[in-house]
Image: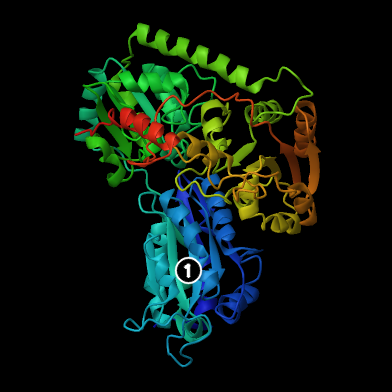
Amino acid sequence: MSSTTRLTVAQALVRFLSVQYTERDGLRHRLIAGTWGIFGHGNVAGIGQALLEAGEDAMPFHQGRNEQAMVHAAVGHARQLNRLSAQAVTTSIGPGATNLVTGAALATINRLPVLLLPGDYFATRAADPLLQQLEHPTEADVSVNDTLRPVSRYFDRIHRPEALIPAALQAMRVLADPAETGAVTLALPQDVQAEAYDWPEEFFAERVWRVRRPAPDPLELAEAVRAILGAARPLIVAGGGVHHSEAEEALKAFANATGIPVTSTQAGKGSLRHDHPADVGGIGHTGTAVADDLARTADLVIGVGTRYSDFTTASGTLFQNPDVQFLNLNITSFDAHKLAARTVVCDARAGLEALASALGGHRVNAAYEAEYRAGKERWEREVTRAFEAADENAVPTQTQLLGALDAVVGDEDVVINAAGSLPGDLHKLWRARSPRQYHLEYGYSCMGYEIPAAIGVQQATPDTPVWALVGDGTYLMMPTELVTAVQEGLPINLVLIQNHGYASIGGLSESVGGERFGTAYRYRAADGTFSGAPLPVDLAANAASLGMDVLRAKTVRELREALATARASDRPTCVHVETDTATPTAPPAAAWWDVPVAETASREAAVAARTEYDRQAAARRTHL
């Protein structure tokens, strides 16, 4: 008979998590590298006590300020480590638990692992209703944690101690599975957390979860080879799966061998270094002109690790060749079958290596190579034009800010963004120099992601210079984890852009007939609209009050100097700059994005926008 150890459920869970590992290509990582937490009555005496008892060596603890932000930090950590390591997040019952929902949605949409451990009602109903418990009149077993079900890849509520064993094993399976991963939720009734049980010692044995690299099916591979051999204008769309699989070198070798041009989604940018001859930049609504022109004429689109969001496909209007076909390499069957594609359900690296070998030296026509290389050269001139400033003493535009940052960063730096107008400028213009430099969360495009994600990236790779790029709208939503960066001595760099409102949505509003309604941060004017003077908000002073070192830059020259100072600092540093929004320097969108416009309206702007909408929507295709 096996021996047992008497522990509470929370103590057993923490001990179990401390001995879980992933392994891929012979390299081992802790699966749960640490736990973020904010404590309340739903977890303080359970998970909180268990973490204290386990100690920092067994389970490092990170103190958060906002539950959503803790999930974002964990997601940043997981992405930086190619999904081979994750973090857990514990909260109380009630608002602490429901604050997890946005972060969980972000993690699952982006296929990134995070373990959520929210407190829950008393399983025994000894105290019913307890503080913060939702009472449902017809479903007594429902709690606020059920809001996490649709945004979790795995969900369980642990009503009995012994139920933890199968639930914990299933949770680890999903977190470590590249085809299944996302947010995993174990809802923990607070009385069960503190309940003791005699646990089998085998439960605490070191366990290794091997991250598979499934090879292509031979028949699917043969069909893929025939499709490529028969294509005159093939085009690769590199998605986030290239990074997650660490397939960048395989993609480079494939492009070198075949000459097929490579575009990238927001998640896939950096799959090839920006100066590789086959890299033609981002694709879709925020893509480069050369990539989108190639996409319109491509007769074979090869998707590698992409889920084909509406930004990538320009809302179904981008791939216009009447004979276009799709070939998708994806570890997830659900994504591989999109756009009625030929499928190769496999690991990205394994698939690219197998394809390169099977193609036997096949290469695209030299005229096609010359065409896209000339387009790449033209686009590079556009990038230089957008980055350069004629007057070093002028207020910088947003693209000139990116140019100043481009001049300061090294290959190892990580640049993080998620929302606003920056994703479009970055996707079109940023010169990605390494696989992990470009860190855009655009599956959920969640305002507030950048600062906590920077903390997670800095934790994962302590010697890496990390930049969080945020506008004033994003900053006001979630600056809280700056306190955490200061507390932990994490030298993240925050670039805080003041443009007095929701600038990105303001521009979108104007283009769809909304006339920038409700998007400016201004006083009300006499007519009641938000068109008065800008608000006298000093966000730099706010960042300083949270413990950041703050550098204020008013000109292009001052900005470049401030960025260099921040990068050299070993303290969390904020560079605050007000940008010129009146002088457009970014290239216009080269492809459409479907934002439905009012079909009937009395205002002239909306009527005109609807006319343009109908014109663009007529180009939409359904690929069958």
Residue 303 picture location, percent across and down: 34, 32
Q: Quadrant of the N terminus?
A: bottom left
Residue under numbered circle 1: 205
Identify the residue at the far front of this view.
Answer: 526
Q: Please, is residue 18 above or below residue 135 in the view? A: above
The type of colouring in the image is rainbow
**Position of residue 61 in the picture relative to residue 27 (left or right):** right
Please give the name of the residue rendered at 49% of the width and 80% of the height, measured from the top-left corner. Answer: 9
Observer-nearest of 107 and 524: 524
**Position of residue 406 in the picture relative to residue 186 (left or right):** right
**Dot 1 crowding, Cα within 10 Å, few <14, some 14–19, many 20+:** few
**Position of residue 499 in the picture relative to residue 24 (left or right):** right
Quarter-of-image position of residue 500: top right
Please give the name of the residue rendered at 54% of the width and 40% of the height, measured from the top-left corner. Answer: 506
Residue 134 picture location, percent across and down: 44, 79
Q: In which quarter of the image is the C terminus?
A: top left
Q: Please, is residue 424 above or below residue 358 in the view? A: below
Q: Visible in this render: residue 569?
A: no
Observer-nearest of 27 and 506: 506
Observer-nearest of 76 and 612: 612
Residue 94 picture location, percent across and down: 51, 75
Type of residue at label 1?
A: Ala
Please give the name of the residue rendered at 35% of the width and 38% of the height, measured from the top-left corner. Answer: 308
Q: What element carries label 1?
A: loop
Please give the name of the residue rendered at 23% of the width and 24% of the height, measured from the top-left corner. Answer: 227
Residue 275 picture location, percent across and down: 54, 20
Observer-nearest of 505 and 551: 505
Q: Visible in this render: residue 17?
A: yes
